[in-house]
Amino acid sequence: MKTAIVELQTYDDVPTLQDKLLWARAPRILLVWPEAGRPRLRGPVDLVLLRRYAARLGARLALVTRDPQVLAWAQQARVLVFPDVETAQRRPWRTPRRRVVRPARRVNTLPRPQRGMAPAGRGWTRALAALVGIAAVGALLAFLLPAARVELLVPGETQQATLTVVARVGGGEAALPLQRITVTVAGEYRRPVQGTRLWPAQPATGQVVFTNLGATAVDLPAGLRIASYTDPTVVFELTRSGRLPPGVGQQLRLPVRALRPGTVGNRPAHDLRVLPAPWDLRVTVTNPEPTHGGQDLRVPWPTDADYAALRRHAETALREQAARELRARGWPWIPASLQVVETRSEAFTPAQPAATAELRLRLEQRYQAWALDPATVETWLQQALDARLGAGWQARADSLQWTLAAAEPVPHDEGWAWTVHATRLVYPAPNTAQVAAWVRGRTPAQAQAVLQAHFAGREPPRVRVWPGFWPWLPWWDARLQVVVVPPVAGSSDAR
């Protein structure tokens, strides 16, 4: 059965993986976990989403990993796991089934009372139990039914810091680990040809005179070939036929044209004298006047220097394109580490030197560079900013923003260093247990007044009671929910 193999990257999340599953187009899809780092998956919940999405596409999903944490996730999400790709392609895919443990059937071992004999006191016992049950349910409803939600709108501030992020290969103390990132780029490039070459353009023409060596007439056909005496590679042919009169010494003049164009056909007088057999035994031939009209033109012709210059230009352009694509990913990377690791294809047009005014090259290369995973940088920035945060303050989880002061890092202690400007939204976090104690059992108006007294200068809190007609907030903390509403972006001051 066809199996599509998808190699996961550290920047993959559920949407990108769903897009890869859509393009896999196979009944079995095998996700290969990266050896270093982890994709942006939150745990078994994301694996369940991917498994269900693959099922909707008519495919089965499996993983290739040895990570203990991922193995635990896969077991909870009921996703097959194989140690390597070969084992996954060789073994059948059988989804593990959950074992359902059914409770043992209880058998009533009490003796069945005889018909017509009722236990003594059963009537008033049942009535008492019913009354107690009704009273208990009423008390429970009276105690548990009310519920309340208190929302505290806290003001926010912007926490700012300029930090130095240090990274090196393999990580280390006070340094983040660098990762290899690759990018494949391709393009077609053109360059005018600088070299030239003489190219035969016009064949030479002339006339030859045949002399009869016998007493009979000789028919000379068109196309009869006559070679040069000094250069046998130069050959002419008759452009029309003729009949040589009978008799020794009889002559006939006929036009000829060189088979090969160019100045090589401009031969001197009495140079066209070689005839093929058996014509050389019947007639002689010569050109009384030189042949003329052969011309050579100087045409563009690529040289080795043209090929080398075009390849250098293409490599420079591809290197710049790879750098642009790496910058577009948003990863802090080291431009000095960018290098070619593979030339996937290279095709010149023309492949061999030929007459052409333009030389073309189609080139595809794979580049590699050292970079920092943005998720690792964000985790480090969160920890660094948390260390500077005062007691009783919290940060909004989705508010961290950071930018690099410079695109290129600077060398730092066998590694590299970036200057990062980081900002996030922080707010004071009240003690929810203390807030619940202040408002427990009060009316909504009393609770709001108490909270405004403790949190003066802030937005009024929101107090909601369920059901709406209930006059007091509940006494039980489990039915009293205190929620701290973080500030939204743009509603904070600098800190």
Image (cartoon, helix red, strand yellow):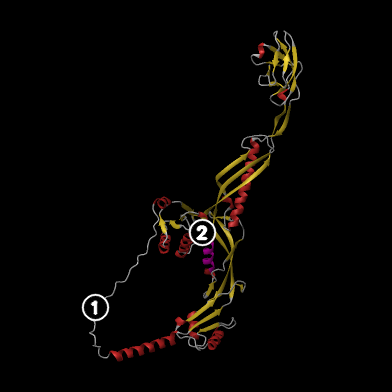
Is residue 147 one of those drawn in magenta? no
Q: In this image, 292 relative to 61: left or right?
A: right
Q: Magenta residues: mostly which secondary structure?
A: helix
Disc 1 versus disc 2: nearer the observer: 1
Placement of 380 over or under 345, stated as above or below: below
Question: Callout 1, which amino acid?
Answer: Thr
Q: Residue furthest right?
A: 289
Q: In this image, 49 relative to 337: left or right?
A: left
Camera-side residue of 369 and 212: 212
Which range is magenta? 375-385
Q: Residue 313: where, in percent of width, then height?
A: 64, 44
Placement of 280 over or under 92, stated as above or below: above
Dividing the picture into quadrants, the one containing residue 105 is bottom left
Placement of 312 over or under 408, stated as above or below: above
Considering the image in quadrants, where does the C terminus appear?
bottom right
Dividing the picture into quadrants, the one containing residue 490 is bottom right
* Badge 1 or badge 2: first in the primary sequence: 2
Camera-side residue of 50 and 71: 50
Q: Residue 175: where, in percent of width, then height?
A: 51, 59
Question: Callout 2, which amino acid?
Answer: Leu
Camera-side residue of 494 and 366: 366
Residue hosting label 1: 109
Residue hosting label 2: 17
